[in-house]
Amino acid sequence: MRKLSIRFAAAGTALCLMPATAWAQASPGAGRYACWGPHMMGWGGGWSGMIFGPLMMILVLALPIAAVVLLIRWLGGSRGSASPGQTPLDILRERYARGEIDKEEFEERRRTLGD
């Protein structure tokens, strides 16, 4: 029984002294900069944070925006009224047939197109 209590006492003492041994091995200035590190805001003291920080912010904003725009274009397809085989004169004739332009404007634009 006595040996068991001595073992418990030794184990308790060892457990109590473990934090002290870890604290003794820490560097001398470890407590001073526990929150932010040795430099302002924890950047590590250099110009790289000032350069790469804004660049990363631009990338973080630009990449999702570009992805959304490309996705919308891909899903939307072609929205133009002209089919790939139509010439400008064909489009002009369609507009005249639909009544969007009158005869004088049609003739003027046809002359401008060189036909």
Image (cartoon, rainbow, N blue to C red):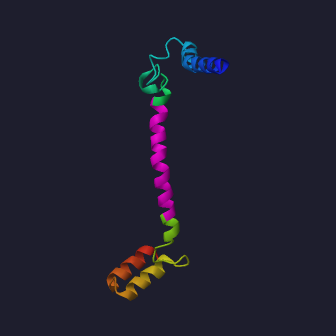
Q: Residue 75: x percent and y percent?
A: 51, 69
Residue 9 in the figure: left or right of residue 108: right
Q: Residue 25: x percent and y percent?
A: 58, 14
**Which residue is at 49% across, 23% downward?**
46
How many labels, in total?
0
Residue 105 in the figure: left or right of residue 38: left
Residue nearest the viewer, comparing 78 with 4: 4
* Residue 115 in view of the camera: no
Q: Residue furthest right?
A: 3
**Which residue is at 45% across, 77% downward?**
81
**Which residue is at 34% across, 83% downward?**
100
Q: Which residues are magenta?
A: 50-71
**Which residue is at 55% across, 12% downward?**
24
Q: Judge whether residue 110 is colored magenta.
A: no
Q: Is residue 109 above or below residue 2?
A: below
Q: Main secondary structure of the magenta part?
A: helix
Residue 44 in the figure: left or right of residue 25: left
* Residue 3 in view of the camera: yes
Where, by quadrant of the figure, is residue 104 drawn? Answer: bottom left
Q: Residue furthest front?
A: 1
Where, by quadrant of the figure, is residue 103 drawn? Answer: bottom left
Q: Residue 63: x percent and y percent?
A: 50, 50
**Can you say which quadrant of the picture contains the N terminus?**
top right
Q: Is residue 75 above or below residue 20?
A: below
Q: Residue 85: x percent and y percent?
A: 56, 78
Residue nearest the viewer, comparing 108 with 44: 44
